[in-house]
Image (cartoon, grey):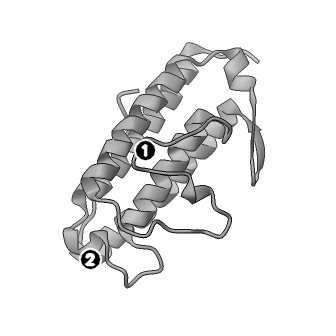
């Protein structure tokens, strides 16, 4: 497999745009919606779930992975354990900054060997390059959910981000 720098730059910009959109959604979320328990999953939990898996998929493996404190590996529990208390918006935006740096590092370190490394998760396996695309789709899926929640609550939602800094 060969990896072209312009391709990596494009993936980096699109991943950055998806992370920007997640950040915008979290920033725009009104306090009354953040931990509203009237839905199956509160806004804060969807944001946390998105960040946890973004971070894990950027790492490429469960082995050796640890999210930054105060976050734990409970998201990996097959029983679907949700943290006992909502995480504050500031804590999750800090986690987002951590994930942004991890994404920049992953894209910056991309080479043919890393891109072709096999990554295994409970849903299956993919090479790291495909996992990056899967990760981007996962983030954007949940950004759509979060923006819908904001729109239903406030009548508007953050705008689309075309390109991230990459």
Indicate the quadrant where residue 145 lies: bottom left
Q: Does the rendering let one see residue 64?
A: yes
**What residue sits right under mark 2 in the picture?**
153
In what quadrant of the picture does the N terminus appear?
Answer: top right
Measuring 66% from the left and 31% from the top, which residue is drawn there?
129
Label 1, label 2: how far apart the Cα atoms are: 22 Å
Q: Does the rendering let one see residue 136?
A: no
**What residue sits right under mark 1 in the picture?**
18
From the viewer's side, name the closer residue of 106 and 69: 69
* Secondary element at tag 2: helix
From the top left corner, tell me how far across and down residue 165 is, in percent.
35, 28
From the top left corner, tell me how far across and down residue 138 is, in percent.
55, 52
- Using a 10 Å C-alpha cutoff, classify the residue at mark 1 as few (fewer than 14 neighbours), some (14 to 19) or many (20 or more): many
From the top left corner, tell me how far across and down residue 91 is, in percent.
30, 50
Measuring 68% from the left and 24% from the top, which residue is drawn there?
115
Q: Earlier in the sequence, mark 1 or mark 2?
A: 1
Most distant residue in the bottom direction = 38
Q: Is residue 129 left or right of residue 105?
A: right
Measuring 26% from the left and 77% from the top, which residue is drawn there?
153
């Amino acid at each position: 497999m060969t990896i072209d720098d312009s391709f990596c730059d494009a993936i980096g910009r699109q991943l950055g745009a998806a992370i920007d959109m997640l950040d915008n959604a979290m920033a725009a979320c009104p306090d009354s919606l953040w931990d509203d328990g009237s839905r199956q999953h509160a806004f804060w939990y969807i944001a946390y779930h998105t960040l946890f898996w973004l971070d894990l998929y950027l790492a490429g493996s469960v082995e050796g992975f640890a999210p930054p404190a105060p976050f734990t590996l409970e998201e990996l529990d097959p029983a679907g354990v949700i943290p006992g208390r909502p995480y504050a918006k500031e804590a999750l935006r800090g986690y987002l900054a951590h994930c942004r740096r991890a994404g920049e590092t992953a894209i910056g370190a991309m080479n043919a060997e890393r891109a072709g490394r096999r990554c295994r998760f409970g849903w299956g396996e993919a090479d790291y390059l495909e996992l990056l695309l899967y990760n981007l789709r996962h983030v954007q899926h949940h950004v759509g959910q979060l923006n819908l929640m904001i729109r239903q609550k406030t009548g508007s939602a953050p705008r689309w981000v075309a390109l991230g800094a990459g």
